[in-house]
């Protein structure tokens, strides 16, 4: 006859080890193994015990049944909480490994861009350098000699008036009123042939309005060689403007006067807004004045030690802001400087 089963001992052993085994499971696989070991349909130890309860006398069943069911509930709860804890741990480990910065703003990210004036300046120097012009630079603080005297601007010329020029207090210096002093600096330091562009900031003591600013940018061009003529100037400026404004850009020369060029011309570009028909932007003329130019005055060449009988050349100076406004179809220069992002975003 087989030994009678010692239910109480079996029960004690099972219940003592079960919850401990569950709480020690430290991987999802170990949790599953503990579940199979205890609650598996076929061989689970608690399942087996529950099944065999039916062989017990009724009083024993009443005593052990609720206990066994309570243990089953406790094990199930324990397994579930282990699973949750392990899932959370796995998620944390995954996030730590991926180094995702959850504080970053979501895409699309705002991207910076060049200021429209810088962009125009960059394109201008780009085109001129392809036409063979090398970069030359000069200081923003100049002396009277380079800014006026060398450029054949006489002492009584109105440009020298404090109304137009910013002079430095107590020093014989000024803020350059144009990029032309770079011509003087370059011609004094270099022998012809010369082909340079000088981009940069210039200053005028002027009231600010829709088309004037006290600080703005110019690009100067200077070409000195043998037998340079107005035809070379016109060809170069046509290519320059077509590169900047598109293949349809047309220019015209108007006679003008600058002390440092002879002959002098003002160059207009056909209005891009109305294609020459006449609109408010071009004051109904169909043309917009964009730059000053001419053949370098013999006095300027001589001042720099260049013999005007051997060499001739052209020079031009073009305002970057005015060109930027024209390209963008914007009416007011102040819109370029107020740096309202909402405006700047529309411009580029
Ligand atoms: N320096 C002139 C200005 O600022 C422009 C210019 C440059 C004209 C070169 C002729 C030749 O108005």
Image (cartoon, grey):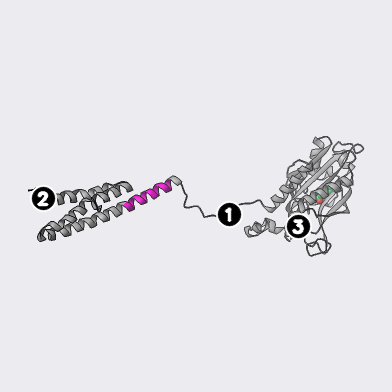
Sort mark 1 into few (<14), some (14-19) or many (20+) by Cα contacts within 10 Å. few
Q: Does 329 sit above or below residue 310? A: below
Sort mark 3 into few (<14), some (14-19) or many (20+) by Cα contacts within 10 Å. many
| Closer to the camera in the image, 122 or 147 | 122
Q: Is residue 155 visible?
A: no
Which residue of the protein is positioned furthest toward the left in this rendering? 1
Q: Which residue is mark 3?
A: 326
Which residue of the protein is positioned furthest toward the front in this rendering? 1
State which tag comes first along the sequence, 2 or 3: 2
Q: Residue at x 28, y 53 (%)?
A: 79
Magenta segment includes 84: yes
Residue 133: x %, y % from top left: 78, 41
Magenta segment includes 256: no
Q: Quadrant of residue 182?
A: top right
Residue 83: x %, y % from top left: 32, 52
Q: Which residue is mark 2?
A: 6
Residue 170's tag is none
Q: Which residue is mark 1?
A: 110
**Range shown magenta:** 83-96
**Predominant secondary structure, magenta span:** helix
Residue 170: x %, y % from top left: 73, 45
Sort mark 2 into few (<14), some (14-19) or many (20+) by Cα contacts within 10 Å. few
- Distance between mark 3 and mark 1 Cα atoms: 27 Å
- Distance between mark 1 and mark 2 Cα atoms: 75 Å
| Closer to the camera in the image, 324 or 171 | 324
State which tag comes first along the sequence, 1 or 2: 2
Q: Does 66 sit above or below residue 18? A: below
Q: Secondary structure at mark 1?
A: loop
Q: Is residue 245 visible?
A: yes
Q: Are marks 1 and 2 in contact (CB under 8 Å)?
A: no
Q: Does 25 sit above or below residue 284? A: above
């Amino acid at each position: 006859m087989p030994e009678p089963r010692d239910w109480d001992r079996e029960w004690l052993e099972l219940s003592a080890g079960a919850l401990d085994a569950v709480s020690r499971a430290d991987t999802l696989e170990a949790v599953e193994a503990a579940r199979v070991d205890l609650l598996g349909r076929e061989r689970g130890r608690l399942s087996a015990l529950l099944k065999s309860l039916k062989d017990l006398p009724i009083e024993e069943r009443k005593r052990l049944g609720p206990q066994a069911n309570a243990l089953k509930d406790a094990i199930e709860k324990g397994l579930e909480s282990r699973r949750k804890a392990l899932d959370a741990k796995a998620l944390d480990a995954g996030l730590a490994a991926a180094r995702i910065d959850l504080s970053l703003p979501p895409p699309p990210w705002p991207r910076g861009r060049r200021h429209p004036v810088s962009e125009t300046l960059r394109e201008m120097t780009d085109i001129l350098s392809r036409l063979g012009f090398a970069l030359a630079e000069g200081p923003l603080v100049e002396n009277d000699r380079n800014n006026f005297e060398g450029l054949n601007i006489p002492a009584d010329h109105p440009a020298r008036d404090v109304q137009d020029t910013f002079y430095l207090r107590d020093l014989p210096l000024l803020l350059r009123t144009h990029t032309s002093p770079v011509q003087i600096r370059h011609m004094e330091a270099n022998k012809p042939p010369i082909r340079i562009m000088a981009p940069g900031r210039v200053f005028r003591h002027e009231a600010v309005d829709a088309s004037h600013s006290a600080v703005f940018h110019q690009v100067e061009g200077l070409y000195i060689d043998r037998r340079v003529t107005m035809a070379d100037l016109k060809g170069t400026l046509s290519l320059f403007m077509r590169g900047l404004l598109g293949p349809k850009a047309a220019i015209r020369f108007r006679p003008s006067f600058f002390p440092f060029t002879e002959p002098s011309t003002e160059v207009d570009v056909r209005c891009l807004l109305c294609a020459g028909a006449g609109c408010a932007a071009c004051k109904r003329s169909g043309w917009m004045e964009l730059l000053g130019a001419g053949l370098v005055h013999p006095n300027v060449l001589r001042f720099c030690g260049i013999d005007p009988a051997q060499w001739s050349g052209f020079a031009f100076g073009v305002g970057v802001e005015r060109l930027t406004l024209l390209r963008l179809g914007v009416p007011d220069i102040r819109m370029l400087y107020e740096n309202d992002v909402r405006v700047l975003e529309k411009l580029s």
